[in-house]
Amino acid sequence: MPELLHQVGLLILVAQLESLADCNAVQALAGQVHSSGFGANTLYVVMQPSASAGERQKVLAHYSLQLLGMHADSTVVLPGDGAEVLCTRLTERVAVQAGFVCG
């Protein structure tokens, strides 16, 4: 798969941090990026847990995001609440970051 990614200008990965499984997946991605990368510029779009999430989940999400941010080319963090404006925020922030990563 890395051979195919060299042909891609930008890889965009979207994740949420709402559950333990989500955080584990983001930590696994961080490990992959740290060990060998994906062979392409990578932009991570991460949605924080909602306000109703427990304090433990919020702390785990924060840790997972910090770990990913240490190794990512660029990361966009979106609030976990406010789904009605999520598409607009996502489009605007991804466009800015994509220009930064590829520019």
Image: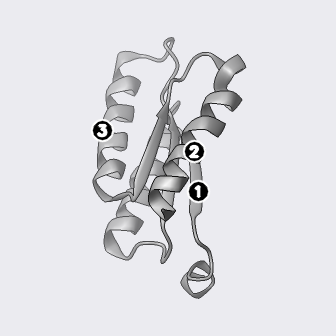
Examine the rendered structure and indicate whether residue 49 appears above or below residue 102.
Answer: above
Please tell me which residue lies in front, 15 or 10. 10
Does label 2 or label 1 sit earlier along the sequence? 1
Q: Amino acid at mark 1?
A: Ile
User: Number of numbered discs present?
Assistant: 3
Disc 3 + disc 2, Cβ < 8 Å:
no
Badge number at residue 38: none
Q: Amino acid at mark 3?
A: Tyr
Q: Amino acid at mark 2?
A: Val
Q: Callout 1: few (<14), some (14-19), or many (20+) C-alpha neighbours within 10 Å? A: some
Image quarter of residue 64? top left
Examine the rendered structure and indicate whether residue 70 appears above or below residue 3.
Answer: above
Residue positioned most to the front: 103
Mark 1: which secondary structure?
strand
Mark 3: which secondary structure?
helix
Does label 1 or label 3 sit earlier along the sequence? 1
Please tell me which residue lies in front, 85 or 26. 85
Q: Which residue is mark 2?
A: 94
In this image, 39 relative to 12: left or right?
left
Query: Percent from the top left, x then y, of residue 42?
Result: 49, 62
Query: Percent from the top left, x then y, of residue 82?
Result: 62, 16
Q: Callout 3: few (<14), some (14-19), or many (20+) C-alpha neighbours within 10 Å? A: some
Q: CA distance from mark 3 to mark 2?
A: 22 Å
Query: Going 50% across and 64% down the picture, which residue do you hit?
Result: 102
Q: Which residue is mark 3?
A: 63
Query: Going 59% across and 56% down the picture, which residue do you hit?
Result: 12
Badge number at residue 12: 1
In this image, 48 relative to 68: left or right?
right
Does label 3 or label 2 sit earlier along the sequence? 3
Q: CA distance from mark 1 to mark 3?
A: 21 Å
Examine the rendered structure and indicate whether residue 94 appears above or below residue 56.
Answer: below
In this image, 45 relative to 36: left or right?
right
